[in-house]
Image (cartoon, rainbow, N blue to C red):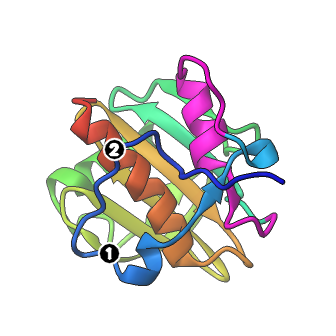
Amino acid sequence: MARASHVIVEPVHIGDALSKKAQSIDCRNEGGRRRRRKMSWQSYVDDHLMCDIEGTGNHLTSAAIIGQDGSVWAQSSTFPQFKAAEVTAILKDFDEPGSLAPTGLHLGGTKYMVIAGEPGAVIRGKKGSGGVTVKRTGQALIFGIYDEPVTPGQCNMIVERLGDYLVEQGL
């Protein structure tokens, strides 16, 4: 029987703003086991962002870790081809919160309506039954894109948990 493993290698500190329900989200890697190997950026995407959520078989639609210079550190095979101008606009919204609100967040040609986030730290976007969460760390942007049956809260938790961990590691 597979044992559950948490999204991130311990320690993980979850912000006080996250609800108890969000804190309890369990995310398993393929096979339900934690892999014992040195982590690569692709491992963070595969094992922590594109993981099976709470043993349901559901997972994010796509995910990526992108450097603040626009370089791709790692991405899922389904992550959309984005334009440099889209990343530049996202970075501008982190520095000037609200700058994306009038035009929306564009990623790979898809327009998301910007919804409440955390100024300077998290941008959230919604489109139909899906959406996107972007977490800024010291050096990178963590992207998670979801669609039903994954909920916005589950996507937020997965992306923000990894982002918080990377911030704690100085990344």
**Residue 37 pos. (x, y %):** 60, 19
- The reply to whether residue 33 is in sight is yes
Residue 16 located left or right of residue 69: left
Residue 83 appears in the figure: no
Along the viewing direction, whichever of 149 and 67 lies nearer the viewer? 149
Magenta span covers which residues? 34-57
Q: Is residue 51 above or below residue 126?
A: above
Which residue is outermost to the front? Answer: 1
| Residue position marked by numbered label 1 in the rendering | 18
Dot 1: within a 10 Å radius of its alpha carbon, few (fewer than 14), some, or many (20 or more) residues?
few
Query: Residue 94 falls in which quadrant of the image?
Result: bottom left
> What amino acid is labelled 1 in the image?
Leu
Residue pointed to by mark 2: 11
Residue located at (33% from left, 37% from top): 166
Camera-near label (1 vs 2) is 2
Q: Residue furthest top?
A: 38
Farthest residue, direction left = 96
For the residue labelled by badge 1, is the local secondary structure a helix, a strand or a loop? Answer: loop
Tell me which numbered mark, 1 or 2, is placed earlier along the sequence: 2
Q: Which quadrant does the C terminus fall into?
A: top left
Magenta stretch encompasses residue 44: yes
Residue at position x 22%, y 30% from top? Answer: 170
Identify residue type, mark 2: Pro
Q: What count of labels does the image hold?
A: 2
User: Dot 2 lies on which element?
Assistant: loop
